[in-house]
Image: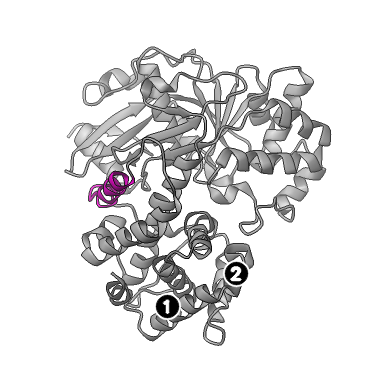
């Protein structure tokens, strides 16, 4: 077998004999977009949309400069440097077909961990007209129960007193916007691409809270000049596996240290309000609307909550992946019951969307056996996800008199996982969460206080004071602690 060829700009002609590669010029590509948080999702979604535009000969001034502000970003920075910022996108179809394509929309990458100046300078540059974000739900630094900015964060306290030495997204954004104001440059748009309802509004609220504490005059200018469009993003993007890297080497003869895998489905709905121009994304299928709220809510309450339902219940049962959960008829029926009886009734009408069709497609996407999205990934950072995805649905159904039993069992299972830490086979359940210590401490008190876990108001609000919820939750917890066979409990409910 021939030695695999390194994925680099100079080798694209050879790589292009086995898979599609960029046909556009990348050398003099302007970076009109600076993106903070270059993970797999960004590379499968926003960067892919821009790549499609560039393949059409459009948007030459809109190249992406990736930004890393965490120590963990150094690995991708180094790989990108070696690969001229190129990577392979592997689209995995349910029938086993895999479509690889080299993506060239990202043309630079700056690290701001040890030296923030290159990042601030790039964001403050006149060519930068959009700063987009995929920083995860936890990156927004707000209290899930109150929605208020968390000023107790030590990095935030550091930035308030050292504005030229930022550590968080808020410190970098304010430093760059301050410089633009001083240089009389127009403000850039801040475009959130995270799974938070009203993500643009949330980004605006949090940034103005921070900037108001650091520099009230700047906060006033930001509020007047910066646009924060809300957006709804969707494409399932599992963690890259070693097998994906090896498949590229063995099947296509390409050495890519960090390819990205994704499903065929892709969607992006954006409010059309930008302060300094935008690429013509509508030419590649992006939907621009006056109000993205209904679409956001639909996606968060059905897709994201549905993922958490399968992930948390599947973790206790011992299923490793989401598609494995969907192969189980009980899990599939339970998920559909949750969607139909609890999530859908609180969504209302959504223009242009048939919710039954949408749910049918979701079930097909979750069942894609070629994606192998791990239960661990789906369950990670549940403390940041569940208040927006699932607990909000419980609150709405309590207010309207709707069903809460399906979602409540998921919360009881979440408590059980944090207390016991093992599945039904006694195997450890390893889930990453910034609140792990708090979750485990509260869950550990369940033996003496069945409501201890849901008394965490920062996550659950005042659910522990609601009689209907506490009766439902206590019953679910008692059943689980008596018999951890989650599938039996699910079967009883459908």
Residue 167 shows in this picture: no
Name the mark nearer the viewer: 2 or 1: 1
The magenta span reads: 355-371
Which of the pair 4/243 is nearer the observer? Answer: 243
Q: Which residue is mark 2?
A: 438
| Residue drawn at point x = 69 percent, y = 40 percent | 207
**Considering only vertical position in the picture, is 481 above or below 427?**
below
Q: Nearer the viewer, residue 269 or 349?
A: 349
Q: For residue 438, what is the image quadrant? A: bottom right
In the image, residue 50 sits, relative to residue 307, either above or below, namely above
Please tell me which residue is depicted at 31% across the width and 22% down the height of the picture: 21
Number of numbered discs on residues: 2
Q: Quadrant of the N terminus?
A: top left
Please say if 421 is above or below 8.
below
Neighbours of disc 2 within 10 Å: few (<14), some (14-19), many (20+) = some
Q: How is the structure coloured here?
A: one colour
Q: Reply yes or no: does residue 360 show up in magenta.
A: yes
Q: Picture coordinates of residue 270 (x, y %)?
A: 49, 31
Q: Is residue 464 left or right of residue 265?
A: right
Residue 421, can we see it? yes
């Amino acid at each position: 077998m021939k030695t695999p060829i390194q994925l680099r700009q100079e080798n694209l002609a050879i790589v292009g004999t086995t898979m599609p590669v960029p046909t556009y010029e990348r050398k003099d590509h302007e970076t009109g977009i600076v993106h903070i948080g270059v993970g797999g999702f960004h590379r499968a979604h926003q960067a892919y949309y821009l790549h499609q535009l560039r393949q059409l000969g459009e948007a030459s001034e809109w190249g992406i400069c990736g930004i890393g502000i965490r120590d963990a970003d150094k690995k991708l920075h180094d790989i990108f440097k070696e690969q001229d910022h190129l990577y392979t996108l592997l689209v995995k179809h349910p029938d086993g077909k895999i479509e690889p394509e080299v993506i060239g929309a990202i043309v630079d990458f700056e690290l701001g961990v040890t030296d923030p100046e290159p990042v601030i300078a790039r964001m403050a540059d006149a060519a930068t007209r959009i700063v987009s974000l995929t920083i995860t739900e936890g990156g927004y630094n707000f209290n899930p129960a109150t929605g208020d900015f968390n000023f107790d964060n030590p990095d935030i306290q550091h930035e308030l007193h050292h504005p030229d030495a930022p550590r968080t997204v808020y410190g970098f954004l304010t430093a760059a916007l301050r410089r633009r104001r001083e240089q009389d440059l127009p403000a850039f748009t801040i475009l959130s691409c995270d799974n938070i309802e009203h993500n643009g509004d949330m980004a605006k609220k949090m940034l103005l809270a921070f900037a108001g504490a650091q520099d009230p005059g700047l906060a006033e200018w930001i509020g007047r000049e910066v646009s924060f469009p809300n957006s709804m993003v969707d494409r399932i993007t599992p963690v890259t596996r070693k097998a994906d890297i090896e498949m590229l080497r063995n099947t296509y003869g390409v050495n890519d240290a960090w390819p990205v895998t994704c499903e065929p489905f892709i969607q992006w709905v954006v409010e059309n309000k930008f302060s300094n121009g935008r690429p013509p994304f509508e030419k590649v299928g992006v939907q621009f609307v006056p109000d993205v709220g209904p679409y956001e809510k639909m996606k968060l309450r059905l897709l994201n909550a549905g993922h958490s339902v399968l992930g948390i219940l599947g973790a206790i049962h011992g299923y490793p992946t989401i598609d494995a959960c969907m192969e189980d008829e009980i899990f599939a029926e339970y998920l559909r019951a949750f969607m139909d009886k609890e999530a859908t009734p609180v969504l209302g009408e959504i223009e242009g969307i048939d919710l039954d069709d949408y749910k049918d497609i979701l079930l097909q996407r979750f069942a894609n056996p070629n994606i192998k999205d791990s239960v661990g990934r789906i369950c990670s950072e549940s403390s940041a996800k569940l208040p927006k995805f699932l607990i909000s649905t419980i609150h709405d159904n309590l207010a309207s008199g709707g069903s809460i039993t399906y979602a409540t069992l998921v919360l009881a299972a979440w408590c059980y996982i944090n207390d016991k830490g093992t599945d039904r086979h006694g195997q450890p359940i390893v889930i990453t969460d910034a609140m792990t210590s708090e979750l485990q401490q509260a869950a550990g008190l369940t033996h003496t206080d069945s409501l201890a876990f849901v008394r965490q108001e920062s996550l659950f609000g005042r659910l522990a004071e609601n009689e209907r919820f506490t009766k439902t939750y206590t019953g679910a917890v008692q059943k689980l602690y008596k018999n951890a066979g989650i599938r039996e409990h699910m079967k009883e409910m459908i």
